[in-house]
Image: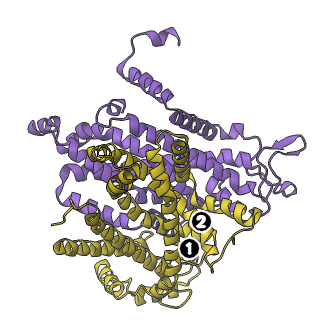
Chain colours: A purple, B yellow
Amino acid sequence: MNEQTSAPMSGARRELVLTLKRLRRNKGATLGVAILLIVSIAAIFSSYITPHDPTFRDIARRLKPPMYQQDGQTFLLGTDAVGRDIFSRIIYGTRITLIVGLASVFFAGSIGVLIGLLAGYLGGWFDSLAMRIADVQLAIPFMVLAIAVAAVLGNSLTNTIIVLGITGWVTYGRLVRSETLSVRRNEYVTAAEAIGVQPARIVFRHILPNVGATIIVAATQMVARMLLAEASLSFLGLGIPFTTPTWGVMIAEGRDYLTTSWWVSTFPGLAIVLTVMSANLVGDWLRDVSDPRQQLARLV
Amino acid sequence: MVKYITARLLYSGLIVIGAVTIVFGLLYLTGDPVSQLLPIEASPQDRDALRRELGFDQPLHIQYAKFLSRVAQGDFGSSLRYRRPAMDLVLERMPATIQLTLVALVISLVIAIPSGIISAIRRGTALDNISVAFALLGQCVPTFWLGLVLIVIFAVSFPLLPPSGSGSWEYLILPGVTLGVNSAAIIARLLRSSLLEVLSQDYVRTARAKGLNERGVIFHHALKNASIPVVTIVGLQVGVLLGGAIVTEYVFSYPGLGRLILEGISKRDFPIVQASVVLIASIVASINLLVDLLYVFLDPRIRYE
């Protein structure tokens, strides 16, 4: 540690150091954070760190096994059916994975948080309507609805995010609503109402920050779910178009070569498992350490 | 109780109407419903003809009312590809999907219940750690990828089971395991934590104090009380399994509803997609109703008035 950090710490920084200390005590979550960091770095710098061009085709080196060597170059995880380097494509796939994971959670979260806040605060017909829509949506399995919406919208990166957002808001909506119901009974909300604060200001200045911790914990767990859903949609040809290297697409491409070249589908799948597991580990840890109404709210 | 069941039945009916409304709305998501129902190469004349035939030139509320009344009679229109009523096709494929879903559910319970119980009563041991690790892994594995890996191992490297198709019971094992693993992980985790909570209750201590053996404590006192949240999640998992079946059927070329939906999508046969979504929503709504009623038998304290 340098001298600067030994100076009196501000509240936010103290919280951060405290959280990092807590994180170190949980091996699973530490591993999760480490893997997510690696994935993020790979996504940001993918064009600099890929050993080969992820889209360069060379039929002469098609379906070569892991550790294949050609002209002094090593293909760490082998090549696919048109001779593209699988390792480079997995690194490139981190971009789409992160974009879809974060954007769809943000999209689903924005709809869900807004509806949940309003339903919980306003009550009445809006609450009834929103929760009935949520019930209907819950009766249609997530994958079924996502597939139906994807079929109508067509496949593209933006549409995949929209599909996951439309189908995923319910979890947030119900969670934020129930949190809002308990927060709005607090005295500071009553006080704000008594001095005539506008409802919109009460909702966004007084209630939203106090349900923030719950939202963050739910978002982390949601990332894992969205990543799996995106991979499934892409695998079925309903998500990201086949021209873009994503992990789901790569697994689909390897499906025809299962019997001869297991590596084409296996490695992208492992990448999904590792990333989803990391998001789950971090999500579980956040849930455990957050006494939602107390500690984490201050970090928001 | 009768009053409650009636109210609950009515509500389930409302949910199904809601699902019908959603599939009606889906057609309008891109603006022109006719574009969903005809192949891309259809001529403008064809489009106009279909628009008039199905009443898409009428005001929206009239279209909706007509759609509702048709659906109430089980009429989702004809499949453009098979030239047969869409609901008939869906009902033909449904038994295969329900069979797969049930096999997956049984497999997931057979894995989850023992491992959840052992995990809870042997808390902190190596056995618990292994079970918890497998549960975490099971939640993170993409279904379609697990299916492919299982095909490589059990159908290609060691040809013990058929890789795809349907027929005898052997054809159900790999898809069943593939589909069931995720639910097994979720149920095992929940059963473990639920059982741990119940085991710390006073009545369990009383049961032990009066000299009841451990088996009696677990099976007579703890398990039934720990099962309420588990029953809820098992009910919810049926819906998840039905959704997952679509992907699993695709991986294993299993001729069920999922394959029909995906074919319907690729061939722009939208009535099939609509009929399937409504049927699945009806099944899920019925299961939720059954689960609610099951609580009464599990916990006599719950009384619906």
How much space separates mark 1 and mark 2, taking CA atoms? 8 Å
Which residue occupies the extreme front position in the image? B211
Q: Residues within 10 Å of mark 2 (few under 14, many from 20)?
A: many
Left or right of residue B177, residue B76 in this image: left
Q: Secondary structure at mark 2?
A: loop
The answer, for residue A227, to whether it is visible in the render is: yes
Instruction: Identify the residue at horizontal 40%, vertical 68% (top origin).
Output: A140
Residue under mark 1: which chain is it in? B
B94 relative to A159, above or below? below
Q: Amino acid at mark 1?
A: Leu
Q: Residue B109's spot in the image, x, y percent?
A: 48, 62
Left or right of residue B171, residue B104 in this image: left
Same chain for marks 1 and 2?
no
Instruction: Identify the residue at horizontal 54%, vertical 45% (top origin).
Output: B127
Where, quadrant-wise, is the C terminus of chain A in this rendering? top left
Q: Amino acid at mark 2?
A: Leu
Q: Secondary structure at mark 1?
A: helix
Residue tagged 2: A236
Q: Residue A62's spot in the image, x, y percent?
A: 83, 57
Which residue occupies the extreme left position in the image? A194
Q: Residue B91's spot in the image, x, y percent?
A: 47, 84
B116 relative to B200, above or below? below
Residue tagged 1: B262
